[in-house]
Amino acid sequence: MDCLNKRYSKIVFLTGAGVSAASELPTYRGSDGLWTDPETARLATAEVFEQDPQGAWRFWSKFREQCLQAKPNPAHLALSDWSRALVEGQSLTLVTQNIDGLHQRAGSPDVLELHGSIFRTRCSKYDCTLEPFEERQSSCSEVPHCPQCCSPLRPDIVLFGESLPPKADWLSKKALRDCDLFIAVGTSGSVSPASGFVHSAKFVGAKTILVNLEPMHPFNPAFEVELLGRAENLLPRLQFEFFFKQTMIDTSLPPANVHQEQFARERFDITKSPDEQAARYGHLELLGSPDQYRYSDQKFDAWIHRYYRVICTPQYLRICRLEYLTQAEIEEVENDDGF
Ligand code: APR
């Protein structure tokens, strides 16, 4: 998966429902997608809030409950880590089509929610003066009414036929204007304007990568690289590759400037067989030639042990700068049988 071959400075991510699939949230299309059921699909249009506000409220309240129960998965965590560990002169803009709030809960800052948030409620009348407000829990039964104008309330999400939130729309397009790396993750690329972002990125000369479970139909030639697999497996490795390559490219970088903490969900421990690794780290996908990782692992191991303590947990191989480990963490590591 040797596709990050230079130092990038303006990175734009676009995520879709596939990023949250490992958090047990449904996608919209594909075999078990939400919109495959016509009854549910009618709830994806703006008209439904006029025709059946009660039914719409009930459906989206249940979805809100599901999102509340869901937990960020390694794909969300890898993106959060990616943004937290950028070096000077780098920026990362995370644009999501998802309304589930999981990127924020994973620690990603300044997420641009292109299709709104299930955790915000607003009045169904566009010209009402009621400010949208955050609401984690909501009753699934009766649709509440606006205290200002008595119209039914609704989640502050964007449905077909509705316009995008102007700020998120503008900031996304602004970030695309000078990006040099564009990565779309877990999206079918079927809904505009997000589906056109890759063309804008390509137009300004960015490297364009799709990380998705299935190939895009029809194939979008604007993507230079297609990495097919689960985002929860691929993103941690891509993030690992990004920082490792960048670090190795910039060996002049004193370690203090280098990312302080990096999750690498899986890497090839050249002393272990894939089966032993799978037992230790769970599912492993052979994504790069062992030699390629063997080389980087040897260099990486040498580099790591000079500056880092490695913490192995059932989910993550966690690499933290020595001075960032608390005494408790060091003891945890010493006693951790996964180590
Ligand atoms: N890892 C990576 N990709 C995955 C995974 C996974 N674990 N699971 C599913 N996918 C892929 C599917 O193959 C599919 O291509 O994620 C994509 C999800 O596509 P959609 O269900 O169409 O979701 P999305 O692209 O986000 O839809 C865009 O459409 O209905 C509107 O507002 C809704 O924001 C949504 C928009």
Image (spheres, rainbow, N blue to C red):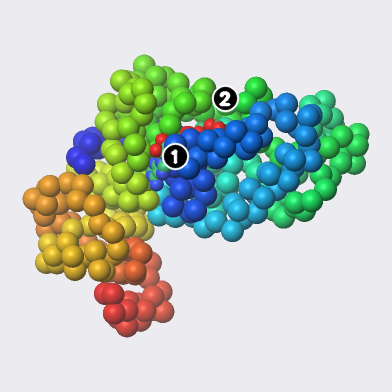
Give the SS element for disc 1.
loop
* Residue for point 86% across, 41% down: 145
Place of residue 320 in the rendered image (x, y in percent of width and height, measured from the top left): 33, 64
Observer able to see residue 279: yes
Using residue 24 as the reference point, say whether residue 311 is left or right of it: left
- Quarter of the rendering containing residue 183: top left
* Residue for point 75% across, 51% down: 140
Image quarter of the N terminus = top left
* Circles 2 and 1 in contact, beta carbons < 8 Å: no
- Between 158 and 84, the one lying in front of the other is 158
Residue mark closest to the camera, 2 vs 1: 1
Question: Does the closest atom of ligand 1 sit within 8 Å of the Cβ of label 1?
Answer: no
Residue lying farthest top? 203
**Residue that badge 1 annotates:** 31
The amino acid at mark 2 is Trp
- Quarter of the rendering containing residue 338: bottom left
- Between 284 and 225, the one lying in front of the other is 284
- Between 249 and 334, the one lying in front of the other is 334
**Residue that badge 2 annotates:** 170
Looking at the image, tell me whether mark 2 or mark 1 is earlier in sequence order: 1
65 up-or-down from 250: above or below: below
The amino acid at mark 1 is Ser
